[in-house]
Every structure is written in C-alpha cells, then in structure tokens.
Image (tube, rainbow, N blue to C red):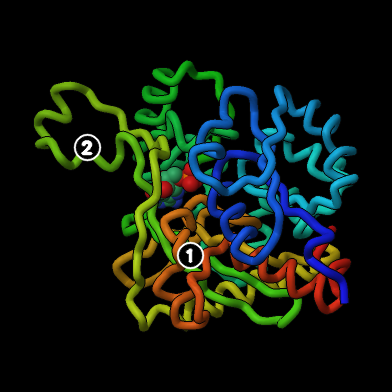
Amino acid sequence: MSNIKDYKIATLGSHSALQILKGAKDEGFETIAICQKGRREPYEMFPVADQIIEVETFEDFFKIEEDLKKQNAILVPHGSLVEFVGPENIEKISMMHYGTRGIIKWESDRVKEREWLKKAGLKLPKIFKTPEDIDRPVIIKFHGAGGGKGYFLAKSPEEFYERYAKQGGDKKYVIQEYIVGVPIYSHFFYSKLTGQIEIMSFDKRYESNADSIGRIAAQDQMDVDIQTSYTIAGNIPIVIRESLLSKIIEMGKNVVKISQEIEPGGLFGPFCLEAVLDNQLEFYVFEISARIVAGTNPYTNGSPYTWLKYDVPMSTGRRIAREIREAIETGRLEEILN
Ligand code: AMP
C-alpha cells in the first residue's frame, strides 16, 4: 500500500486555498501554498500551509514546477489558478494535477460550454446574436470580466447601445436573456473512485452593487443614475428547499455523463452549476465551473449536506484530499490525475 506521507498537496494561494490546504492537512497530507508576491499573509496567519513558495508571474509557476515535482506534490486547481496560468496554459502543466485538464477548455469557452449543458438537457437562458434582436430584458456580460464588473441590463436595442457606449463601447460581450428569479449555485462532487455524485452545498454570491441597490428607494436610484454591477465581494450560504434536491441531483448526473462523451476522462471531482431559479421552480443554468468554486468557502467546517453523509466536518477541500488519499491507498492514483 502506498503511503500518503510520500505525497504533498499544493495549490495557488488564493480563491479557496485556505479550505483546500486545511482539508489536506485534516486528511494527513503535508501542504504547499504557491503565493503570488505580496499575497502570502493569509497563508501565514492561518496555519494551513507547511511551506510557502513565492512566484511573481505565471511563467515563474512553470519555473518552480520542477521543485514541486521533486517533492511529489499534487496540484489542486481552482478558479484563480486557471486565471493566473491562463486556460491555454493549463494543459502545459506537467506535474501531478487533480482532475481532467481537458475539461477546462469546455468551461472557459462560452460556445462549447453551452453545447455541453444543452446536451445534458439543462435549460439555459436564451442568447441573442445581435443587439437588434433584443425583445425582452437581457443581461450583457463581458468576456473575461473579473467578477462581473461592468455587466449591464437592457430591454431594447436602443437601450443596449446607449448603455454599451457608457462602458467604452469596445469590449466583447454576450447578450443573455435576463431570468427573473433567485441565483442558486449548486456545488457537487463526483467521485471517480465510487462512481457516485454527492451534493456538497449551495451558495449565492454577494455582489457589489447588485446586492445593495435595494437598500435605497427607487427614486434615489434614479436620481443618482446608478448602474447595476455584479462585482463579487463574497459568498452567502443557502439551504435549498428539499423537494428541489432530486432535480438538482439529476442535473449533476447528466452533466457528468455528457462530459464523459465530449472529453476523454470526463469531469470528476468538484464542480458547480450556476443558475437562476424562476418562480415556476425551473433552473436556468448560465454557467458551469468544472472545479472547486469559492462558493464552497462558507463550509470550511462542512455543510448541512456533508454532515448528513460524513462523520467529520467535510469541506469540499477536504473531500478532494480524501479522494486523493483513498486513491493513493488503493493504488488508483493514476485514475484521478490528468
Ligand atoms: P456571472 O458572472 O455569469 O456568474 O453572473 C454574475 C451575476 O449576474 C450572477 O450572480 C447572477 O446574479 C446574475 N446573472 C447572470 N446571468 C443571469 C441571467 N441570465 N439572468 C439573471 N441573472 C443573471
């Protein structure tokens, strides 16, 4: 039997690293935080990293990769890693990497992403090819917008052009039907070892200024000409109406099933379906994250759902480490690295 003491868990110091590293330690691993210069303090304040390695640019990441390999470190990816290294460079990572790297190209390309979700039978918000087609409320999203900055709403072509001009009028965008409802982000874990899907938790985002506009009267909002924006500030836990769980489990299963058809190795480990639930209780999924999301951060100590299944506080970070530990101990590590 292989020993987990022969391995370490490494991740980039940002996003959900505190939870990933804490979870790895709880499962008995030594841990490494790779920190961008000037961002090491949280990983010193909270004792989750046995080692901190500093890098300045994403090229430096590839320079320290040799050292990480020598230490037999397994890299756990998250959203900031994809952003830092670049989706196009993820496939160049040659150290042990948890999860299917090939799936990243499906989640980071809006066209491919829609193809995947549609095949999985999910309902998606309609996409408008040109502003002239706008015939209902829409949300305009910019490509690569850091946390929803600058997104705006419109309900006609005229309104679109007027508001687009205010944004500089030169950014690439996508026009999506605006779904009136509540945002719900469902966090899953698909275990390659057991072949089972698990619901980990739910959250909604706390967005500036979308989440505070309602605190002032409509008249005041108009007087000061506020534009809605969706800059992420944090995450708020949700416990979902229990009768919705079957539908959510089915959506998760279908997404995994189709991923196996479209990409060798398929999707496994943590992932998230980002949706708006309307008042007919229909989920409109507008995005998938094929990795751990920061929305799992409120659950460092486990969620109401993981408490039903596990006898220890099980965060998503810890669930990843447990999967890696069990894979090592049963000689199946190769199956979960890619
Ligand atoms: P995103 O950057 O795509 O995650 O979207 C940022 C926020 O915009 C989400 O948290 C939702 O509150 C909202 N949002 C995104 N897409 C839609 C949509 N199609 N309809 C309604 N709200 C949306």
Crowding near pointer 2: few (<14 within 10 Å), some, many (20+)?
some
Q: Nearer the viewer, residue 309 or 222?
A: 309
Q: Is residue 131 visible?
A: yes
Res 177 seen here? no
The spot of residue 207 in percent (x, y) is: 35, 41
Left or right of 336, for residue 30: left
Give whichever of 279, 288 is nearer the camera: 288
Q: Quick one: 74 or 305, which is closer to the camera?
A: 74
- Callout 1 secondary element: strand
Where in the figure is residue 144, as x and y percent of width and height?
Answer: 59, 34
**Which residue is found at the position 78% from the left and 70% from the top?**
260
**Location of residue 300 in the rendering, given as x and y in whole percent from the top left corner:** 47, 59
Q: Nearer the viewer, residue 149 or 195?
A: 195
Q: Above or below — where is 31 with respect to 315?
A: above
For disc 1, the marked residue is 186
The residue singled out by tag 2 in the image is 213
Q: Nearer the viewer, mark 2 or mark 1?
A: 1
Between the C-alphas of marks 2 and 1, the distance is: 25 Å
Where does the image place residue 204, in percent across and percent down from the top left? 38, 55
Q: Is residue 148 above or below residue 305?
A: above
Q: Quadrant of the N terminus?
A: bottom right
**Residue shown at the point (79%, 73%) measured from the top left:** 327
Q: Point out the image quarter for the C terminus.
A: bottom right
Image disc number at residue 141: none
**Vertical comparison of 189 with 19: above or below:** below
Between discs 2 and 1, the one toward the N terminus: 1
Q: Amino acid at mark 1?
A: Ser
Residue at image location 53% in from the left, 78% down from the top: 249
Q: Secondary structure at mark 2?
A: helix
